[in-house]
Image (cartoon, rainbow, N blue to C red):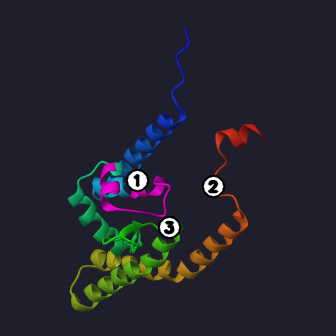
Amino acid sequence: MERAQEPQGREEQEFRDDFVTRFAEYWQSQGRPKSEGRIVGYLLVADRDAVDAEEIAVGAGVSRGSVSQSVRRLRELGFVSLVSAPGRRSKLVSMDEDVWGGFLRNERSYLRHQRDLAASALERLPDLGESSRRRLGNMYDYMTWLDGYHETLLSRWEEYKARRGERDGPKTSKEQRNV
C-alpha cells in the first residue's frame, strides 16, 4: 500500500523547521547562544525581506525576550538591521542578502582588536617566558596577516558572486534532473 503524498507546503515547512534546528546546532557549537542561531536560521529561510519580532519568535521557536536580546547582538555583529515599515510603530528585522560578505567586512575590527591586545600584552608583560611570548607573537602575527588579506578576500568574494551570475545558489534536485 502506497503512502499518501504530503502536501508540498507541509514538506517545505518541515524542511524549514529542520533547517532552523540544524543551523542553530552548528551556531551553538561555535559558542553562540542556540536561540540566536535559531533566529539567524529562521531569517535565512523566512522568504521575506523583513519580519516583525513576533513572527521571528514563532518561526524560530524562541521567546519574544530572546528575539529582543538576540537582535541586539546580531545587529552588533552585522547580521541584521532594523528597518521602518509604513504604518507600523515597531521596526522590522532585516537580514542583508549578503550577510556573509558583511560578516567578512566586520571581522576586520575583531582582528585588529585581537592584534592590539596581543601587542599590549607583549609590551606590558616584559618578563613573560619564551613560550608565552611566542604564543602572543603568533597571535599578533596571525591577526596582522589575516587582516592584510581582507581586501583580497572581499574582492575575490565580489568576483565570485559576479561570475555566479543570475544563479542564486546550487541547483535544486529538480533542476539537476532536467540538465
Q: Amino acid at mark 3?
A: Trp
Other-residue count near label 1 (Cα within 10 Å), few / some / many at <14 / 14–19 / ≥20: many
Residue 157 lies left or right of residue 103; in this view the side is: right
Instruction: Judge by depth and name the residue closer to the eye, 100 or 71.
Output: 71
**What amino acid is at disc 1?**
Tyr
Q: Residue at x 68, y 72 (%)?
A: 159
Q: Is residue 136 left or right of residue 173?
A: left
Circle 1 residue: 42
Mark 1 vs mark 3, foreground winner is 1
- Image location (x, y in percent) of residue 41: 41, 54
Region rendered in magenta: 40-58
Give amino acid for label 2: Gly
Q: Which mark is residue 139?
A: none
Look at the image and tell me whether residue 142 can be seen.
no
Give the spatial CA distance, label 1 vs label 3.
16 Å
Q: Are marks 1 and 2 in contact (CB under 8 Å)?
A: no
Q: Residue at x 42, y 58 (%)?
A: 43
Residue carrying label 3: 100
Q: Position of residue 167 (x, y in %)?
A: 69, 58
Which residue is painted at 34% across and 80% down in the image?
Answer: 114
- Of helix, strand and loop, which mostly describes the magenta segment? helix
Quarter-wise, where is residue 88 in the image?
bottom left
Q: Which residue is mark 2?
A: 169
